[in-house]
Image: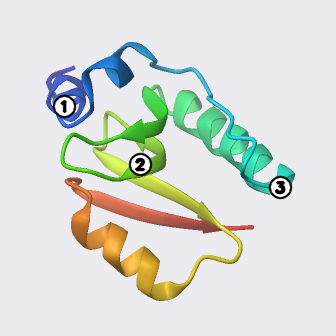
Amino acid sequence: YLAREKSLELLEIHDRFHRNCVRLNVKNGDEHELEKVRQAIIILRRGHQFVSEARFKRGGRADLFDLDECEAIEIVNSEKEESLLRKQKDYPVEKFSVVKV
C-alpha cells in the first residue's frame, strides 16, 4: 500500500484518480492498444494497481504505470532505441520495461 502511495506522488494530480482504467489513445495502432489491455490484465492478476497513459509531474507519459512496482511499461512497435533510452532516463521510476508488438 505504501509503495502505491509513493508511486502516485510521481503523477500529475488528475491521473491519480484513474486507477485500473485502461485509457485508449486513438493515435496509437490497434495492436499497440490491444497489448496495453493485455498488460493491464497481467498487472491486475498480480494484485497490483496501474494507471494507463500515466503523466509524470516532471514530464513524460508512460503507456502503463504499475503503482505497486513503481514500473513504467512502454509498448512499442516502431519507436527508436534513443527515444526509449531517453524515457528510461527521464521517467522518475524504479523499473522500466519495454513490450514489443
User: Height in image: 85 above or below 19?
Assistant: below
Looking at the image, residue 47 sits to the left or right of residue 38; the answer is: left
Looking at the image, residue 32 sits to the left or right of residue 44; the answer is: right
User: Height in image: 23 above or below 35?
Assistant: above
Which residue is rendered at x = 45% and y = 64% of the image?
Answer: 97
Closer to the camera in the image, 12 or 31: 12
Report how far apart the C-alphas of labels 2 and 3 lie in the structure. 19 Å
Number of on-image labels:
3
**Kind of residue at badge 2:** Arg
User: Height in image: 98 above or below 17?
Assistant: below
Viewer-nearest of discs 2 and 1: 2
**Kind of residue at badge 1:** Ala
Q: Residue 22: x and y, percent? A: 62, 28
Report how far apart the C-alphas of labels 2 and 1 lie in the structure. 20 Å
- Which residue is disc 2 drawn over? 61
Q: Residue 88: x and y, percent? A: 32, 69
Looking at the image, residue 99 sits to the left or right of residue 35; the answer is: left
